[in-house]
Amino acid sequence: MKQSLFLVCMLFAVGTLVAQPLAPKFSFGVHGNFTMSNLPGPAVSGSASLKDAYGAGWGGGAHLDVSLLMFGFRLSGDYMKYSLDEDRFRSSYAGVFGGAVNQISINGGGLSIFSLNANGKWNILPLPVVTPYLTGGVGLAWLSVDETKTSISGVAGNTFPSRSEGGKTSLNLGAGADLSLGLTLFVEVKYVWILTEGETSTYVPVTLGVTF
């Protein structure tokens, strides 16, 4: 009788352990982003786009995780904001204005990116506290640039109208690590491609977040 009871308990325990990884765990969290980028800036009349008009950006978002033992999914929404880098903007005009380029003033030109992404997460070394992982996926991105006005020594110069590109396909690939301390903290670095018109835009966000 005892042997039979012990066998039943063992079978129940094994069955529980086997079934556990198959039951997905759902969790929600928030995160912040900091990034350096290579995003085309406003086009200069008669020349190419300003490839390096934007530098550092910041933003944040929210995510929903669906986790199994070694693999999971992350659905996330992100908002990023960039300000026009005036020094980079001026350097792009140096060939047109020469020494007068330092007298150019710039207003506006802020860039916003809103994106929705579906990513896979592959745990590569599941340790008790720290779990490194690889991540990658696809999404959609919406970009908008504010109107940009320039002036030289107070005299109005060029005006670049606001514009937007919506529903552009984005791809990303990166790595990160989860730190489990009751709740889960994580750090993540990705390389992101947005298939914008004419030239692909890229940026590398560093993400810090918490998952409850």
Image: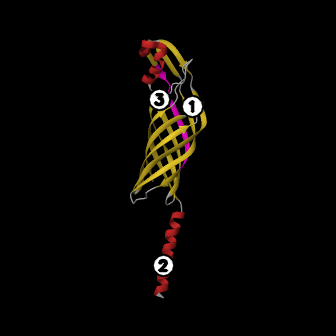
Question: Is residue 108 highlighted in magenta?
Answer: yes
Closer to the eye: label 3 or 1: 1
Which percent across, then down, holds residue 46? 57, 17
Callout 2 crowding tier (Cα within 10 Å): few <14, some 14–19, many ≥20: few
Quick check: marks 2 and 1 in contact, CB under 8 Å? no
Q: Secondary structure at mark 2?
A: helix
User: Badge 3: how crowded within 10 Å, few (<14), some, or many (20+)?
Assistant: many
Is any atom of residue 66 visible in this view?
Answer: no
Q: How many marks?
A: 3
Start and end of the magenta stretch? 106-119
Q: Secondary structure at mark 1?
A: loop
- Kindly state the secondary structure of the residue where label 3 is placed: strand
Mark closest to the chain's N terminus, 2 or 1:
2
The three-letter amino acid code for the residue at tag 3 is: Tyr
Q: Which residue is mark 1?
A: 199
Q: Magenta span: helix, strand or loop, mainly?
A: strand
Q: Is residue 56 visible?
A: yes
Assign the C terminus to one quadrant of the image: bottom left
User: Is 115 left or right of 205, judged from the image as shown?
Assistant: right
Tell me the amino acid under the disc marked 1: Glu
* Residue carrying label 2: 9
Q: Position of residue 197 (x, y in %)?
A: 60, 31
**Mark in front: 3 vs 2:** 3
Measured from the top left, where is residue 61 in percent x and y?
49, 43
Earlier along the polypeptide chain: callout 3 or callout 1?
3
Q: Which mark is residue 53?
A: none
Report the amino acid beneath label 2. Answer: Cys
Image point (54%, 64%), residue name: 22
Badge 1: residue crowd in 10 Å (few <14, some 14–19, many ≥20): few
Q: Which residue is label 3 attached to?
A: 54
